[in-house]
Amino acid sequence: MKQRCIFVASVFGVLVASLWGSTLEKGLTPTQIDMLMASVKLDPSTRTAMNAVSNNDIRDLALNREIAAVKDEVFSFKLPTKGITDQQESGRCWLFAGLNLMRQEVIKKFELDEFELSQSYLSFWDKLEKANVFLEFIIETRDRDLLDREVQHMLEGPIDDGGYWGYVVGVVEKYGVIPKSFMGETHSSSETHRMNYILESAVRRDALQLRTLAAKGKTVADLRQEKMNMLKDVFRILVINYGMPPTEFVWRTVDDSGKASLPVTYTPQQFYKEVIGVDLSQYVSLCNYPIHPMDKHYSIKLTHGMADRSDISFVNLSSDELKSYTLKALLDSQRVWFGCDMGHNVHGKKGIMAKNLYNYEDLFGVGLGMTKAERLDYRHSSSNHAMVFVGVDLVDGKPRKWLVENSWGDERGDNGLFTMTDDWFGEYVLDVIIPKKYLPERILAIYEEPSVPLPVWDPAWQSLR
C-alpha cells in the first residue's frame, strides 16, 4: 500500500512538473530577454531612427516624398463638383456619400451655385429605424443566452453612426429627402458621441426590460406594445438633439444668374421623386472580398438598417471588374459611390491615396507586407469609409488615377477632392455601387440568385464610418 502511494505520488509529481514545465515554456525567460536585447544594436542608423521616431509623427518620417511631392491634378475626365460637404465628428460617411451622389444632379438641373441635401434629416430617421431594429431583435431573441454571439454583437453597437449603401436606399425611399436649409446641422448631429451614448443607454435599458417581461411570460404582442412606448423615448431624445423633422416645406431656387424660381410646396417624399428623380433601387452592390469565392451573391446576417428591409447583399467580383464597371458608369457622367479602407497609405491633409505612400518597413527595418485577402482575414483591413468617384485620368484607355469627392470639408486635399492612384484602388477599394444598366447579364443573373448568408462577424462586413 505504501509503495502504491509512493508510485501514485511520483506519477502525480511528474504530471504536475510536466504541466508546470509547459507553462514555464510559454513565458519569456531571462535568457530569452537577454537574447532579444542583444538582437538590436544601437548602431548609427538604428539610433537615428530611434531619435527621429521618438520625437516626431511616424507618418511624417515614413512619408514617401517621391509620391507625396508630385502635384498631379490633371484628369482626362472630370465631373463638375460644386461645394464640399463635411461630416465633421460623426460616422455618417455612407450617408454623405449617398447624398453627394444625388445633390450634384440638382445643382446641374437648376443651375445652382451650390446645394446640399439635409444629412441631419436622414440621420434622424436612421437612428429611429436602428432603435426599432435593435428592439425587434431583442424581442425575437428573448430566450437566448446573453452570451450568444449574435446577441452580443447587437448589444455592442445598437445605434451607432455606421451604415452602408442599402441603408441610404432604405431611408431615402421611406422618408424622402429635403434641402439642408430646412434641417441643418446641430452640435449633436455633427459631433455624435454624446448623443449616441444617451441613445444606447436608453435602448440597452429597454433591452433589459423587454427580456425581463418576456421571462415573466409576456407575449410578443405585449412586448411590441411596450416597444412602441420605448420608441417614444427614443424619438424624444432625437427631437431634442436634431429638432423636429419637417413633413413639408416651401422650396425655391436662385440660379447662378440670380434669377429666382416660383415657390413650390413639397413633402420630403415628393422632393425625392420629383426633384432628385434618381431610382436608387436600380443600383447593385459589387464587392471585392478575395477571402470568398468570386462570382457569387452573398448576404450578411443582421445588417438590415430597417426592420422591414432585407440584409445587405453583394456580388463578389475581381478588383479589375470593379474598376471596369466604375469606369463605364463614370464616363457616362454617373457618380459612383464606393467603400474603401482609409487606414492604409492615405495622407488626409494632402488628399493622397497611393500604394507605398508610407515606407514603414524601411523606417523600422521590419517586414509588414500582407495581401488584400490576408489583411481581411486577419482583421487588418475593412471597408471603413465611403466616398464618391467624380473623375478619372486615362492614358491609352487605362486609368492611372481616380478623382474622389470626400466628405471631410474643403481644407483637405484639393479643396476637398482626393486623388487615388489606380494601384491603391486595387488594394483598398472593397465596394462599388453601380446602376444595373452598366452591368452585363451575367452579373445581374448572379445578383438574382439566392444569396449565400455570411455571419455578421465575417470580415466582409464593417459598417462604414
Image: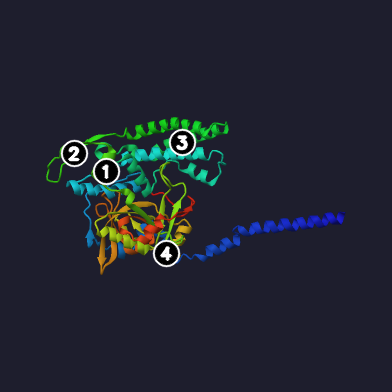
Q: CA distance from mark 1 to mark 3?
A: 33 Å
Q: CA distance from mark 2 to mark 1?
A: 16 Å
Marking on residue 252: 2
Circle nearer the viewer, 1 or 3: 1
Measured as percent of width and height from the top left, residue 186 is found at 31, 37
Instruction: Give yes or no for contact between labels 2 and 1 (Cβ–Cβ under 8 Å).
Output: no
Neighbours of disc 2 within 10 Å: few (<14), some (14-19), many (20+): few
Circle nearer the viewer, 2 or 1: 1
Circle nearer the viewer, 4 or 3: 3
Q: CA distance from mark 4 to mark 3?
A: 45 Å
Measured as percent of width and height from the top left, residue 33 is found at 57, 60
Locate residue 306: give its quadrant. Answer: top left
Marking on residue 361: 4
Q: Is residue 365 visible?
A: yes
Three-letter code for the amino acid on which mark 4 is drawn = Glu
Answer with mark 1 or mark 3, whichever residue precedes in sequence: 3
Which residue: 49% across, 41% down?
Answer: 155
Instruction: Give yes or no for contact between labels 4 and 3 (Cβ–Cβ under 8 Å).
Output: no
Q: CA distance from mark 3 to mark 2?
A: 40 Å
Measured as percent of width and height from the top left, residue 318 is found at 39, 63
Marking on residue 273: 1
Towards the viewer: 155 or 228: 228
